[in-house]
Image: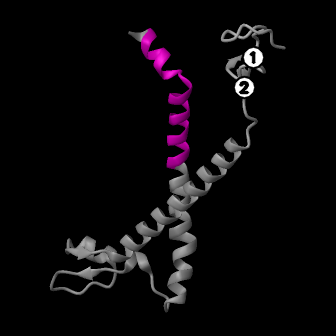
Amino acid sequence: MLGEFKKFAMRGNVVDMAVGIVIGAVFGKIVSSFVKDVLMPQIGKLMGNADFSNLFINLEDGSYETLAAAREAGAATINYGVFVNTVLDFVIVAFAIFMVIKAMSRLKSQELPKPPNTKSCPHCISDIPVAATRCKFCTSEVE
C-alpha cells in the first residue's frame, strides 16, 4: 500500500497540482495585500477618505465609531466594506489567473506539431505507416 501511495504521489500531475495549490495560496495572499494595502486606500482617497474596511451597518441600538469597536461590543453588523475588499480580491485573482492560463495556452499552442505517423500511398491514396515500404492495401512498393 505504501508503494502504491508513493507511485500515486510522485505522478507528474499530482506533484504539479500540489505546487500549483501552494503557489496559488501564496499568490492569493499577495493579491489580498495589494488590494487591502495599495488599491483600497487609493480608492478610499478618491471617495472622500473612506476606509472600506471600516464601512459597516450597525444592526444594534448603540453607535460605534469603528468596526473594531462594534465587534468588541458584540454588536451585530453588516460589514459591506470588508465584502467590497473581498470581491475586489476575487476579481483581481480571477483576472490574474485568466491571464496566466491564457499565456500558458498560447505558449502550448506554439509547440511544434508532432510529425505524422502515416503517409498516403501514391497508388491507392490509402493511409499507411511512415516506415512502410509496401502498401498493405494495394501491395505497391512505396518510398
Q: Is 119 situated above or below 61?
A: above
Residue ID at (72%, 7%): 139
In this view, the residue farthest toward the left is: 61
Residue that carries the numbered disc 2 in the rendered image: 116
Q: Quick one: 112 or 25, which is closer to the camera? A: 112
The residue singled out by tag 1 in the image is: 130
Residue type, label 1:
Val
Q: In the current view of this chain or complex, which residue is farthest to the right?
A: 143
The dominant secondary structure in magenta is: helix
In the image, residue 57 sits, relative to residue 23, either above or below, namely below
Q: Amino acid at mark 2?
A: Pro
Query: Which span of residues is magenta-colored?
Result: 3-25
Identify which residue, 93 or 104, lies in the foreground.
104
Q: Is residue 5 magenta?
A: yes
**Residue 141 image offset from top left, x and y in percent:** 80, 9
Residue 64 or 83: which is nearer the viewer?
Answer: 83
Query: Residue sitting at 53 percent across and 82 percent down?
Result: 43
Q: Report the Cα–Cα distance between label 1 and label 2.
A: 8 Å
SS label for mark 2: loop
Let me know if residue 29 is in the magenta part.
no
Instruction: Look at the numbered discs 1 and 2 and tell me whether their residues touch, using CB distance below 8 Å.
Output: yes
